Image (tube, rainbow, N blue to C red):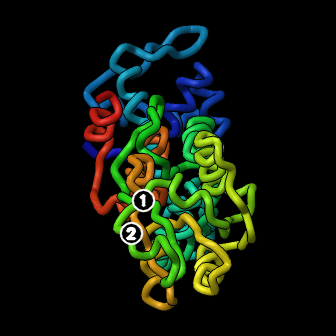
Amino acid sequence: MPFDLTDLRLLLAIAATGSLSKAAATFPVAVSAASNRLRLLEERCGLMLFTRMADGMQLTPSGRLVLEGARNVLGEAQKLQETLQQLVGEQRITLRLAASTVSNSTLLPAILGPFLADYPEVDLQLMEHKSVDVLRVVLANECEIGVYDGILPSGGVVSLPFRTERLVMLVPADHPLAGREQLRLIDALGYAFICLPSARPMQRFVEELAMNLAMPLKVRVRAPSFEAIAQLVAQRAGVAMLPETAAVRAEQELPVRRVALAETWATLELRLCFRDWERLSSHGRQLISFLSGRQFNAAVLGKRHEG
């Protein structure tokens, strides 16, 4: 059944104003032309979409259903127009991704390059938060996508598996702890620590763990990155807790050793989260599919969310 977007826009205008003449004025087009277009649309549909009355026009029950479909079609057409503008460089899209320190500093930089290369029109803002705050900013619509520690309850968001990461201790190669296969955090708390700045979410997490053990960290140096921390550990300035991904890189390049942590909290089951698949931009959906390595649709994600 042929129709065009102008037919649908006219349908919405008449429904909004309750008047053919007022609707025609919003285009603008002659009332006779608008009336003719509506008549032809109704003939092609085989339906009466409006009841004509002396004081205006009112949607029929069939018209209300058609109107709902028209809104959906026009909404998707607008999204397509925006996508085309973005692809030809006429419009840029900004995606906001909130993640924990571990994800932001180790996992995401290593995997986001191909996505950004495929979508040069995208500007990506990476924001660092504690996992509980990642969920908060996603729920508050301050961020489209989040990466958080899956141990937390995720009510109100759609949650998908992302990666597993482990926290380990990094020590100098000749350190007394270097020969251990694994240890508990309390075993390391007697030594000086090389730490991130105190404001970083992961550092707050580590210091809270130590306080819970009634043995505050002996902070010797605060360094700005995992790479800087590893350099200082290699120079015997202290020990450190790092994500295993960063520790493995350091172990390959420096005289350091990683030692597993025995506590269950040291294993992070990281997950992706977002509020609503339908409300995500097309680029946001592409980023979710890219990070998860899977293609999704609204029906599947709705069931997953409900479950």
**Residue 181 position within the rendered picture, expressed as x and y whole percent measured from the top left:** 34, 68
Q: Nearer the viewer, residue 11 or 97?
A: 97
Q: Amino acid at mark 2?
A: Arg
The answer for how far apart the CA atoms under marks 1 and 2 are is 7 Å
Q: Are marks 1 and 2 in contact (CB under 8 Å)?
A: yes
Residue drawn at x 55%, y 27% is 14
From this viewpoint, is residue 27 visible?
no
The secondary structure type at the circle numbered 2 is loop
**Residue 301 position within the rendered picture, expressed as x and y whole percent measured from the top left:** 31, 40
Residue neighbourhood size for the residue with mark 2, other residues' Cα within 10 Å, grouped as few (<14), some (14–19), many (≥20): few
Q: Which residue is mark 2?
A: 180
Image quarter (top left, top right, bottom left or bottom right) of the N terminus: top left
Is residue 293 shown left or right of residue 105? Answer: left
Q: Nearer the viewer, residue 126 or 47?
A: 126
Residue neighbourhood size for the residue with mark 1, other residues' Cα within 10 Å, grouped as few (<14), some (14–19), many (≥20): some
From this viewpoint, is residue 174 visible?
yes
Residue drawn at x 35%, y 33% is 305
Residue drawn at x 62%, y 23% is 17
Q: Which residue is mark 1?
A: 183
Q: Amino acid at mark 1?
A: Leu
